[in-house]
Image (tube, helix red, strand yellow):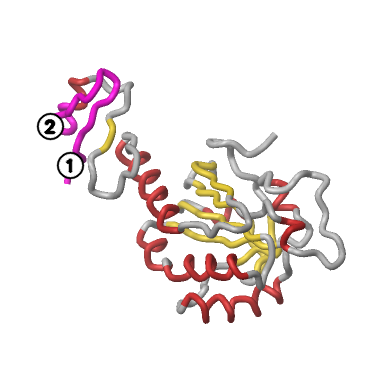
């Protein structure tokens, strides 16, 4: 059974280039993003890690921790960060899990239970270890994305999704397609018109089941 939205993430102890961490303790009361990669020293992954490093101030502003995952070891991670920082032009201050035994990849259903890494492995051997998981302070999975080997992830979209999740959790609303911070939101169907008007001042009823409102500033 795969890890599904609102499931509690596995409470694992893992090795990283920042030392040993327990996932639940590491998340603590924060939001967290786990982003995985098939292998160190690979081209698309290096650009992605650089993109995450460039967004360090944005993650911090949202009270969000980031954690990389790759199947190589701690020493490889430390060396790889030199390349990541050169390409991204920013310090890669986040830890990277050394998932050489595939324990985390399997626990998060990125690889099947019977998967193993052969001698002389290539990125293709761990191709599906290429996912993003957004975790809430309750340690539950809020969103996941999985990409193929040949398409780099858009971390601006990850940031937008994080904003949507945090806004929805804080304001008890939903967000429409292509929503960004500051735009109108969707009133949940379980909220009456009267309660919505009392909270937002007014609502725009597009359809009986689609009501739009502006968040108070």
Extreme residue toward the right, this view: 119
Range drawn in magenta: 197-217
Toward which corner of the image does residue 43 lie, by quadrant? bottom right
Q: Residues within 10 Å of mark 1 (few under 14, many from 20)?
A: few
Q: Secondary structure at mark 2?
A: loop
Q: Residue placed at 27% from the left, 29% from the top? A: 187
Q: Is residue 212 magenta?
A: yes
Please tell me which residue is depicted at 36% across the width and 49% down the height of the picture: 163
Name the foreground residue: 191 vs 178: 178
Q: Is residue 200 left or right of residue 149?
A: left
Disc nearer the start of the sequence (2/1): 2
115 or 75, nearer to the observer: 115
- Specify whether residue 136 is painted magenta: no
- Is 32 positioned to the left or the right of 73 in the image? left
> Can you identify the residue that label 1 sits on?
216
Asked whether the residues under the numbered discs 2 and 1 touch, taking CB atoms below 8 Å apart as contact, a structural biologist would say: yes
Q: Say which residue appears at 37% left-offset and 63% top-offset.
A: 58
> Which labelled disc corresponds to residue 201?
2
* 109 sits left or right of 90 in the view: right
Give residue 99's position: percent from left, percent from top. 72, 60
Give the quadrant of the N terminus: top right
Q: Position of residue 147 (x, y in %)?
A: 58, 51
x, y percent for residue 4: 59, 36
**SS label for mark 1:** loop
Mark 2 residue crowding within 10 angstroms, few (<14) / some (14–19) / many (20+): few
Q: Name the residue at 48% across, 59% down.
A: 65
């Amino acid at each position: 059974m795969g890890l599904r939205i609102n499931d509690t993430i596995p409470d694992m102890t893992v090795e990283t280039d920042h030392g040993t961490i327990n996932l639940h303790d590491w998340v603590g009361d924060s939001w967290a993003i786990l982003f995985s990669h098939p292998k160190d020293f690979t081209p698309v992954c290096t650009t992605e890690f650089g993109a995450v490093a460039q967004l360090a101030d944005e993650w911090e502003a949202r009270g969000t921790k980031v954690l990389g995952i790759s199947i190589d070891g701690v020493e490889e991670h430390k060396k790889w960060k030199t390349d990541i920082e050169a390409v991204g032009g920013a310090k890669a201050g986040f830890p990277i899990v050394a998932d050489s035994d595939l324990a985390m990849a399997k626990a998060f259903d990125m690889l099947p239970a019977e998967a193993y890494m052969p001698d002389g492995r290539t990125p293709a051997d761990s191709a599906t270890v290429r996912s993003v998981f957004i975790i809430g302070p309750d340690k539950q999975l809020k969103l996941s994305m999985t990409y193929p080997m040949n398409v780099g992830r858009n971390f601006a979209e990850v940031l937008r999704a994080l904003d949507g999740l945090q806004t929805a959790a804080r304001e008890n609303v939903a967000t429409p397609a292509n929503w960004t911070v500051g735009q109108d939101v969707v009133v949940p169907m379980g909220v009456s018109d009267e309660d919505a008007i009392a909270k937002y001042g007014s609502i725009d009823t597009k359809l009986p089941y689609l009501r739009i409102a502006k968040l108070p500033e």
